[in-house]
Amino acid sequence: MADIVDKETRSRMMSGIRGKHTKPEMVLRRALHARGFRYRLHGKGIPGRPDLILAKHQAVIFVHGCFWHRHEGCRYATTPTTRPDFWAEKFAANVRRDRATLETLATLGWRVATVWECALRKPDQVSATCDALVSWLAAGEPDIEIGEGDLAARDDGRGVARFRA
């Protein structure tokens, strides 16, 4: 199937996609800041340039787009039908880079939270995601991954939702 716009228009549209200060990232930053957390942004000296760095907690937070970082099982991680080989390699490279970054950060002693954009689409999801991150930071647990499906996690009987760690 041919693209519905010309090559120059597609190029302009794709160049508008940013990696920093995205809407999901800004929503999470505001929610954490409102709860009293202070952080650094996009640290150059830390592998992968995490979106948020909470040095006090020796933790970093990545806000990943479901499409670009291939959130497994997510409805937003679709694959374009044009040039499937190109997209398959591009997505595979992104996933490999993310995995290598996580391993490097773990070696350096950082705890890593990966928050998927699907977990930040609605205000109640933002609140639940923020609750999970606050609990994770306080508990000192290793890594956590929070997606839309994780927000509908089981209740452990005490009113506390459990997330993949």
Image (spheres, rainbow, N blue to C red):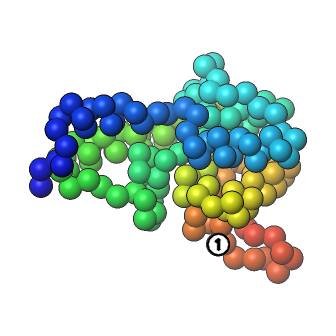
For the C terminus, the image quarter is bottom right
The extreme top residue here reads 45
Pick out the residue farthest to the bottom: 157
Task: For label 1, count other residues whose C-alpha is less than 10 Å away and answer few (under 14), some (14-19) or many (20+).
Answer: few
Which of the 4 image quadrants contains residue 130?
Answer: bottom right
Percent from the top left, x then y, of residue 13? Answer: 33, 37
**What kind of residue is marked 1?**
Ala
**Count of numbered marks:** 1
Q: What percent of the width, then of the height, locates residue 23? A: 57, 43
Residue at the image point whose x is 30% and y is 55% from the top:
79
Looking at the rendered structure, the secondary structure element under dot 1 is loop
Q: Is residue 144 visible?
A: yes
List the residue tagged with mark 1: 152
Q: Quadrant of the N terminus?
A: bottom left
| x 49%, y 47%: residue | 65
Of 155 and 13, the residue lying toward us:
13
Q: As drawn, is 147 to the left or to the right of 3?
A: right
Relative to 128, residue 61 above or below:
above
Question: What residue do we see at 62% from left, 66% from top?
Answer: 150
Q: Is residue 69 left or right of residue 121?
A: left
The image shows residue 160, relative to residue 123, as above or below, that is below
* Residue occupying the point 55% across, 32% down: 20
